[in-house]
Amino acid sequence: MAGEGKPRRIGIIGFGHLGRYLTRKVQVEGQLHGLQLAFVWNSNQEKMEGKVQKELQLESLSELAQRRADLVVEVAHPQIAKEYGEEILKHADFMVGSPTAFAEQGVDAKCREAARRHGHTLYVPSGALWGAEDIQKMADRGTLKALKVTMSKHPDSFKLEGYLQELKERRRGERTVLYEGPVRSLCPLAPNNVNTMAAAAVAAHSLGFDRVQCCLVADPSLLDWHVVDIEVSGPVDEASGHQFTVKSTRRNPSTPGAVTGAATYASFWSSVLNCKGHGGKLFLC
């Protein structure tokens, strides 16, 4: 952590819509929260011109350690955690905005071990996952029996791989269930779209990526919303035989083509403000 009275230096990886939003928040409001921009990196540096001071633009992730960031925030692609996660955790806390990376068990294990070894925190933001802390508490107590996350968006809001992309295009004019099954198998097919589901698998650690179920729906009628339905099942009461259940629906204002809904931007900023160093472990924020 940054020393007392010293600004906490934030590095941002990714300068898409969410990266630009977080960069601007640190630039405008950072001083109020004891934050300072350490660097911004993007695969296409031209996108930062006129928006990020030249001295704050990081040309290569291999030079990351030189910027002495206290927290590195990834909002680019799961490949960042796969290739650089261990190295980042040697020098700073690491907030992984693309937790679909952890569907690969080796990536998950290596990042957790790097956090433990170097005493830095591996953060996973809840993002669009409503009730993430409650799900985690149930997992901690061993009372979480099942979890299903259904995400419905306009077809243009999906960036898919392989047969899912083919299915979406073939059924573009109609509501289509693109996938239903375990979260782990979906992550590599929709790495930019199902981070909410991956965060659910992290929160529901007693079930994990193989037992948390998900459903991905392309719905052309959803012109104004991203919809996330959460279904939680808990223990059965012995006396009554009734099972504890929770169902929630989150309708996030959005437009066709937008990967991230409007309310999720504020959720990410809240997560950044919560990343104050929680020791060498994974922490849901």
Image (spheres, rainbow, N blue to C red):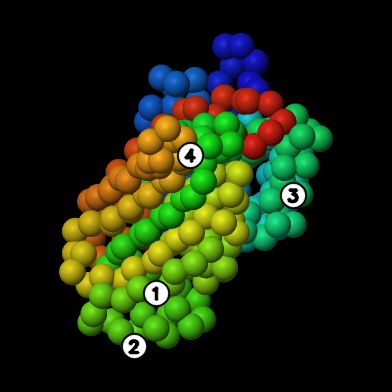
Q: Image quadrant of residue 80?
A: bottom right
Residue shown at 53%/37% (left/top)?
A: 143
Residue bearing the label numbered 3 = 109
Circle 3 Cα neighbour tier, 10 Å, few/some/many (<14 / 14–19 / ≥20): few
Crowd band around label 4 with a 10 angstrom C-alpha radius: few (<14), some (14–19), many (20+): some
What residue is disc 4 on?
235
For residue 170, the mark is 2
Q: Name the front one of labels 1 and 2.
A: 1
Does label 1 or label 3 sit earlier along the sequence? Answer: 3
Quadrant containing the N terminus in the rendered view: top right
6 with respect to 195 (left or right): right
Alpha carbon separation for disc pair 4 and 1: 30 Å
The kind of secondary structure element at disc 2 is helix
- Name the residue that disc number 1 marks: 178
Identity of the residue furthest to the bottom in this view: 170
Q: Nearer the viewer, mark 1 or mark 3?
A: 1
Q: CA distance from mark 4 to mark 3?
A: 29 Å
Cα separation, mark 3 vs mark 2, equals 38 Å
- Give me the residue at 57% from left, 56% from top: 211
Q: How far is disc 2 from disc 4 in space, using C-alphas?
A: 41 Å
Query: Which kind of residue does numbered mark 4 sit on?
Result: Pro
Pick the front one: 236 or 20 = 236
The kind of residue on which mark 3 rests is Ala
Q: Is residue 166 above or below residue 244?
A: below
The percent position of residue 123, horizontal first and vertical second, equals 58, 38
Q: Residues within 10 Å of mark 1 (few under 14, many from 20)?
A: some
25 vs 127: above or below: above
Residue lying at 81% horizontally and 35% vertically, measured from the top left: 117
Q: Check whether the beta carbons of the residues at disc 4 and disc 3 lie within 8 A of each other.
A: no
- Residue 235: % across, % down: 48, 39
Q: Residues within 10 Å of mark 2 (few under 14, many from 20)?
A: few
User: Sequence-wise, which precedes: disc 3 or disc 2?
Assistant: 3
